[in-house]
Amino acid sequence: MTEPDDAELPDLEAGRLLFAQACAFAAAAAAATQVPASKLPEVAFAGRSNVGKSSLVNALTGRNTLARVSQTPGRTRQLNFFALAGRLMLVDLPGYGFAKAPKGEIRAWTQLLREYLGGRANLRRVCLLIDARHGVKPSDLEFMDLLDETAVSHQLVLTKADKITPAESEERRREFAELARRGALHPRLIATSAHTGAGIALLRAELAALALPAAIA
Ligand code: GDP
């Protein structure tokens, strides 16, 4: 496994400080017109249904940030916006890979996503969550194509890393090395576990590097 140089590692303490602060639900959007105006740098989380997105965002923020929205029926196809410390907007994109959904619903959802990704000037990165046990699936590749088309920088984040063996971990790294040739893909793969906390501090630090600077007291 090749690790990046220490010099490239983001500031773990900055990540800890940012994510120790309040994270509040800001808005939900089921249509492009409902996407809130915001000047905050933005990071969106995407992935197949059941990838562990709610668990990861809750682990990052240290609280049940997503519990409120994910338990509300009918809210599953919305974009949910959360403001973190007035410095970074976190956006929960609904899970994809929903083969059983009606075609019209899929079309409407893809259109909303395309408009959001293509028109959001302050969107700094999409964290694309991949279940460490399954690796990158065709629906993930389709989503990556959309990110390429809309020129949105994205980073792959493995979830449920506690569930895989070192050999499987190597396999994921090999697959990632193949994908890393893609232009808008961030060069660091982060393996996380919401259960053990592995990789959470590193991901917080990566995202803190995109946030507005802390106000000087
Ligand atoms: P979402 O649908 O993408 O929001 O996924 P959830 O966060 O609801 O998680 C889906 C399932 O994966 C649940 O049963 C979680 O307990 C499980 N899960 C999520 N994160 C982890 C993890 O880090 N390790 C393990 N072993 N299971 C996880």
Image (cartoon, rainbow, N blue to C red):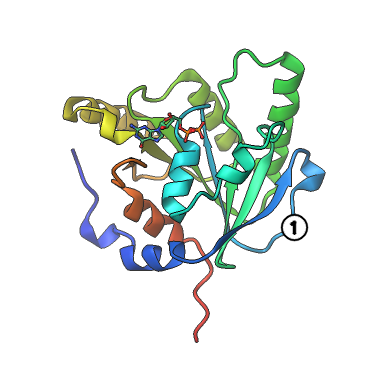
* Residue 70 % position (x, y): 60, 38
User: How many numbered marks does the figure carry?
Assistant: 1
Residue 43: horizontal and vertical position, in percent? 54, 51
From the viewer's perspective, tell me whether residue 174 is left or right of residue 32.
Answer: left
In the image, residue 45 sits, relative to residue 37, either above or below, namely above
- Circle 1 Cα neighbour tier, 10 Å, few/some/many (<14 / 14–19 / ≥20): few
Does the rendering let one see residue 160?
yes
Which residue occupies 72% across, 31% down? Answer: 74
Label 1 C-beta lies within 8 Å of the nearest ligand 1 atom? no
- Residue type indicated by callout 1: Ala
Residue hosting label 1: 37
- Left or right of residue 211: residue 24: right
* 142 over 206 or under it: above or below: above
| Residue 141 in picture, x, y percent from top left | 49, 25
Q: Quadrant of ligand 1?
A: top left
What x and y, as percent, mark residue 59?
A: 41, 48
Q: Residue at x 59, y 68 (%)?
A: 86
> Is any part of residue 209 visible from this angle?
no
Q: In which image quadrant can residue 143 be found?
A: top right
- Which one is nearer the viewer's eye here, 188 or 80? 80
Please, what secondary structure does the residue beneath circle 1 have?
loop
Which residue is rendered at x = 67% and y = 63% of the image?
39
Quarter of the figure with the N terminus: top left
In the figure, residue 112 lies in which quadrant? top right
Which residue extends farthest bottom?
217
Q: Give 58 or 72, whichever is nearer the viewer.
A: 72
Above or below: residue 13 compared with residue 107: below
x 45%, y 36%: residue: 129
Q: Is residue 92 left or right of residue 193?
A: right
